[in-house]
Image: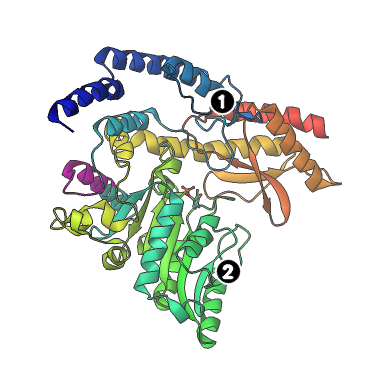
Amino acid sequence: MHTEEIISQLDQLSKISSRLDISADERKEMISELSGFTEKYISELNTQNIFSERKPGPLAIMDHPIPLSELLALYRKEVTGTGINAASGKHLGYIPAGGIFTSAVADFIAAITNPYAGVYYASPGAAAIENEVLQWLKSVFNFPGDSVGNLTSGGSVSALIAFTAARDKHGIKNEKIKSSVVYLTEQVHHSAQKALRIIGLEDIVLRYVPLDDHHRMKTVELKRMIVEDIASGLNPFLVIGTAGTTDTGAVDDLDAIADIAEKYKLWYHVDAAYGGFFILTSKKNLFKGIERADSVIMDPHKSMFVPYGLAAVLIKDKDSALKSNYYTAHYMQDAAGEELIKSPANLSPELTRHFRGLRLWLPLQIHGQEPFIACLEEKLLLVKYFRTKLSELGFHLGPEPDLSVSYFWYPFGKDEDEKNRQLMKEIHSDGDVYLSSSIVNDRFVIRMAILSFRTKKETIDRAVEMIERCLARVK
Ligand SMILES: *Cc1c(COP(=O)(O)O)cnc(C)c1O
């Protein structure tokens, strides 16, 4: 190809490829449309139904250009108009959080500037922000300053990183897998078993420690099981405590588990994915002992209300975390000289990644901690309020909750489970406030999980009205 030909082809290609780099005017127009969309969406959150069983219509990618305005209309109809609207304060199912606006602003900034946050050398500023968020988390959970951590996409990936470090520290491989034991409870989130399977520990022995009346691990039983396992030649390896179980919101006796883990030299992991940030509230005492864990995970996309996609893991043993994740290659050689733990990539299976630290750093700088703490205290009181109202309607309630998740059922007498299931169906087809269900002690129960920053007293009043309506249809 002659140079002239190259130049002429470049000219033609540039005309087309430049469409990706839109003009200042087009950018302004998009931002203005986006702003209109945002305002309308947020202002209607309380009046829109929270749940729709409708299936989405066609969303296939077309081969002709479509303007943003049309796509926003499509998005509204098919995405925000189907399933559960998780941005709404009326979401009281599973574990809601909402998604604060300042975090969305952070995502926008991160995407526009696109810093390479995985490697300190490439973006020392972005990596420093990631590390400052981790420093803040260490201070919140009373972890030592020289522990390490990583910001991940979710609690499941955090658990994966923690368990891999535990596995490598304790050398759990080959024949040792089948004789090693993990202690957990039926209330441990299923992402734990999933992570163990993914990291090659499917054949490890799982010991389910019995629960007390408040759905907390019976630590006396834990100790007994460990002693028995040692006596029969097994290798107690890992114990998983939970600070806020997903189903019932229970916090295990973290300090008592720490004593046992220490005595028998187990890796102690605490899952604080849902409940973690309640440590900042009047419930602080429940978290005593969390600082003694070898690893702890927490989800800012739950109890810090940021949009989905931000969780964290803290690990005390720096070397084990590095051993699992640190890797180098020739094309990385310019970065290799930097201090290893300053680069998030060395403590995670990810290399290139979203600059997710900004999603918490920016909101904390803008708001300070106070409104986050007030919001968590508010949720704790709203659960009490909701439970009182339900009890007045004749519902039976689960035990006094440790945090902001609880459950209830109606004593229909005959066909109790079946009728509570029916009540759940009525609630879902009503669609004003969303609740989900579970099975606790073999009983079908309806759960309330109060965690969205948009959930207010008025939301609970509406939920109570809705439940009354639905109950009348089932009775
Ligand atoms: C939500 C949750 C998880 C899983 O976290 P993801 O962010 O959904 O991956 C793990 N443990 C507990 C206790 C949870 O509530």
Q: Is mark 2 within 8 Å of ligand 1?
A: no
Q: Specify the quadrant of the image occupied by residue 107.
A: top left
The location of residue 138, given as percent across then percent down, is 30, 53
**Whole-Å distance between the Cαs marked 2 and 1?**
44 Å
Q: SS for tag 1?
A: helix
- Among the two numbered marks 2 and 1 on one chain, the one whose residue lies closer to the N terminus: 1
The location of residue 252, given as percent across then percent down, is 51, 60
Q: Quadrant of the N terminus?
A: top left
Q: Specify the quadrant of the image occupied by residue 371.
A: top left
Whether residue 252 can be seen here: no
Any mark on residue 162, and which? none
Q: SS for tag 2?
A: loop
Image: 215 above or below 407 = below
Query: In the depicted view, which residue is nearer to us: 276 or 373?
Result: 276
Main SS type for the magenta part? helix
Residue for badge 1:
78
The location of residue 146, given as percent across then percent down, is 23, 60
Please indicate whether residue 404 sits to the left or right of residue 428 in the image. Answer: left
Are discs 2 and 1 less than 8 Å apart at CB?
no
Query: In the depicted view, which residue is nearer to us: 68 or 239?
Result: 68
The scheme the figure's colours follow is rainbow
Residue lying furthest front: 2
Is residue 217 shown in magenta?
Answer: no
The magenta segment: 118-133
Residue at coordinates 48% horizontally, 29% vertically from top-left?
A: 454
Q: Quadrant of the C terminus?
A: top right
Residue at coordinates 42% horizontally, 53% vertically from top-left?
A: 157
Residue at coordinates 38% horizontally, 59% vertically from top-left?
A: 161
Query: Looking at numbered disc 1 in the image, what kind of residue is underneath it?
Result: Glu
The location of residue 92, given as percent across then percent down, is 58, 36
Residue for badge 2:
209
